[in-house]
């Protein structure tokens, strides 16, 4: 609350300039978002995350840069989870104006597989268990109004592995590693139908070494 407002556009421009001297590709989402925001809800009203639709615009831009064809948004099974009151609601003292107008979380279920394997750190030992890329029973499993965003990836975990055996023939053997914080949760489901293997690392919780992970998975 005491921090001065920063120039977000300026920070993005500086990042792009720094990356221009590396092999990394910089994808600027600002033009696509500026064109879409008049007619599309790209961010929630009561939460700081982008919506699944906003994440899809990022996925389209990523596919264009990566030279792959994005899965059409209209081809997904769409789920809606109502009554979502997110971080902006909780951090601003739960104002009545927000509380009386909750968001709905829309999610798009991957076509090839909705299974994921979650690796959590417990006492230094990794435990592996099965979950859903999009949790279809979110309204039952995550009943709290603040928890609906957990429909994506079942929340934050150190490492998630998704194997889409039904990927198209031309995408067999493809692998992608997504290094993310919570914004990546809504983005990850769209990668599933574009790759045979998707690995998702949350750098806030992962205790391993990325270079070792990349080497081990080829």
Image (cartoon, grey):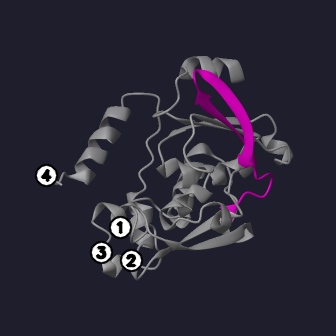
- Name the disc covering residue 2, or none: 4
Q: Which residue is mark 1?
A: 89
Quote the CA–CA distance across marks 1 and 2.
7 Å
Earlier residue among tags 1 and 3: 1
Task: Tell me the residue at 60%/28% (across/down).
Answer: 122
Query: x and y percent of residue 4 in the render?
Result: 13, 52
- Circle on res. 99: 2
Q: Which residue, given by chain and number where applicable, does mark 3 sit on?
A: 95
Crowd class of label 4 (few under 14; some 14 to 19; many from 20; radius 10 Å) = few
Q: Residue at x 52, y 23 (%)?
A: 207
Disc 3 and disc 2 in contact, CB within 8 angstroms:
yes
* Residue shown at the point (57%, 49%) measured from the top left: 155
Residue 190 spot, x, y in % from top left: 65, 54
> How far across and how far down the image is residue 75, in percent?
74, 68
Mark 1 touches mark 2? (CB < 8 Å): yes
Q: Nearer the viewer, residue 78 or 135?
A: 135
Magenta stretch holds residue 117 = yes
Q: Secondary structure of the magenta portion, mostly? A: strand
Residue 3 horizontal side relative to residue 37, left or right: left
Q: Which residues are magenta?
A: 108-131
Q: Which image quarter: residue 204? A: top left
Secondary structure under the numbered disc 4 in the rendered image: loop
User: Which numbered disc covers residue 44?
Assistant: none
Q: Could you tell me which secondary element the residue under label 1 belongs to?
A: helix
């Amino acid at each position: 609350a005491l921090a001065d407002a920063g120039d977000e556009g300026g920070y993005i421009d500086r990042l792009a300039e720094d990356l221009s001297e590396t092999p990394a590709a910089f994808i600027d989402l600002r033009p696509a978002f500026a064109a879409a925001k008049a007619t599309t809800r790209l961010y929630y009203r009561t939460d700081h995350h982008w919506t699944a639709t906003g994440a899809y615009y990022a996925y389209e831009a990523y596919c264009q840069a990566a030279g792959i064809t994005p899965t059409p948004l209209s081809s997904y099974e769409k789920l809606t989870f109502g009554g979502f009151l997110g971080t902006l609601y909780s951090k601003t003292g739960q104002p009545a104006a927000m509380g009386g107008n909750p968001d709905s979380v829309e999610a798009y279920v991957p076509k090839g597989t909705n299974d994921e394997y979650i690796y959590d750190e417990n006492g230094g030992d990794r435990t592996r268990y099965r979950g859903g890329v999009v949790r279809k029973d979110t309204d039952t499993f995550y009943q709290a109004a603040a928890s609906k965003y957990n429909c994506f990836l079942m929340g934050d975990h150190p490492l998630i592995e998704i194997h889409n055996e039904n990927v198209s023939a031309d995408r067999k053997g493809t692998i992608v590693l997504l290094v993310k914080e919570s914004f990546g949760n809504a983005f990850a489901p769209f990668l599933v139908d574009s790759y045979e293997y998707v690995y998702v690392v949350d750098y806030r919780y992962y205790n391993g070494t990325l270079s070792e992970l990349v080497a081990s998975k080829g």
